[in-house]
Amino acid sequence: MNSPRHRSTAVEATGSSIQTAAALLRDGHLVAFPTETVYGLGADARNGRAVAAVFEAKGRPQFNPLIVHVGSLEAASQLADLTNTAKRLAAAFWPGPLTLVLPRRRDSGLSELVTAGLDTVAVRIPDHPVARALLEACACPIAAPSANRSGHVSATTAQHVVDDLGSKVALVLDGGSTAHGIESTVIDATGGPLMLLRSGAVSAGQIKAMTGSSLARAVNQNQRPQSPGQLQSHYAPRAAVRLDALTVNEGEALLAFGDNVPATSGLVINLSPSGDLIEAASMLFAALRRLDASGAKSIAIMPIPEHGLGEAINDRLRRAAAPRE
Ligand code: TXA
Ligand code: MG
């Protein structure tokens, strides 16, 4: 179980509680920890079920891609390709409250859910001694959105985390109040013009002073700032997608859920034979990619219950099924 029923209390961050937290992370549990911006709700970014538990704990009805925290530039370059500009930004602002969206390496080992199926990944090295020590002890990339329930304000003390998510995390490391109190600045540094995806603790002016050019701001077709994470079009299968399928047509591949799977001679991937929505969420993006790569013209998708993580799964599937431009 990722979510203990009891309410966690915060534990002062010490050498030994940080070791405990690292062991919990490596075992697939969730740990909240301080960064210099806000508290993060952390999971091993390579572990799909742990990442799914983050979305479940936050109660987000959508899979937004998460920031992956690492302890060193070397660890960052194992996950993503750093362009020269990205390297200069990293040298100037890391460790610190700047998040770079970069091309994700194929051999990154990250769960597909962390990046919501995108080919890019958001990475940063936090500048907080507890976060750094946790990253070193865990020796794993840590996916961590702000440690608050969806729609609530970000947590800047350990007590905020306990109040909001105490029953959902294995451990809350208390490192006092966070210094900035606002999230990191998110920049698209995938190779085109640098683009500001989310304003945050590093100002656009500081970045301009370093790079010598202004940041483009993400806008959508309505010329309104685009909500972060929606800039890159979400991964869309090439195959047609048919929802709420109870039978499979000739030539269709099947994305199944539960134990009542219709007969078919085509490829079947079951998101969770036992009907576990956390398991299903952890498999979703990888399963869509595999079914699509099979060459099937259409993917039939069995109904998925619209509760808990099912809401976010169905949101993603409805978008995959929507008519393409
Ligand atoms: O200060 C922070 O950044 C905190 C602390 C815990 O580090 N973390 C945080 O994470 O705010 P989160 O997951 O709440 O915010 C991630 C932001 C979202 O706006 C998301 O849309 C964007 O980064 N993002 C993540 N991956 C992305 C990607 N591949 N492409 C575009 N935007 C991405
Ligand atoms: Mg947040």
Image: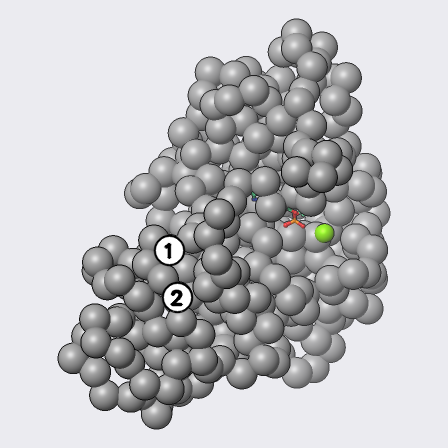
Task: Let me know if residue 304 appears in the view.
Answer: yes
Residue beneath disc 1? 237
Does 193 sit left or right of 171 as displayed? Answer: left
Whether the residue carrying mark 2 lies under 8 Å from ligand 1 is answered with no
Q: Is residue 143 above or below residue 206?
A: below
Q: Residues within 10 Å of mark 2 (few under 14, many from 20)?
A: many
Q: Residues within 10 Å of mark 1 (few under 14, many from 20)?
A: some
Task: Let me know if residue 51 appears in the view.
Answer: no
Mark 1 vs 2: CB contact within 8 A: yes
Q: Amino acid at mark 2?
A: Val
What residue is drawn where x is 66% and y is 10%?
213
Residue 291: which disc?
A: none
Residue beneath disc 2? 241
Ligand 1 quadrant assignment: top right
The Cα–Cα distance between marks 1 and 2, rounded to whole angstroms, is 8 Å
Does 116 sit left or right of 10 as displayed? Answer: left
Say which element carries label 1: loop
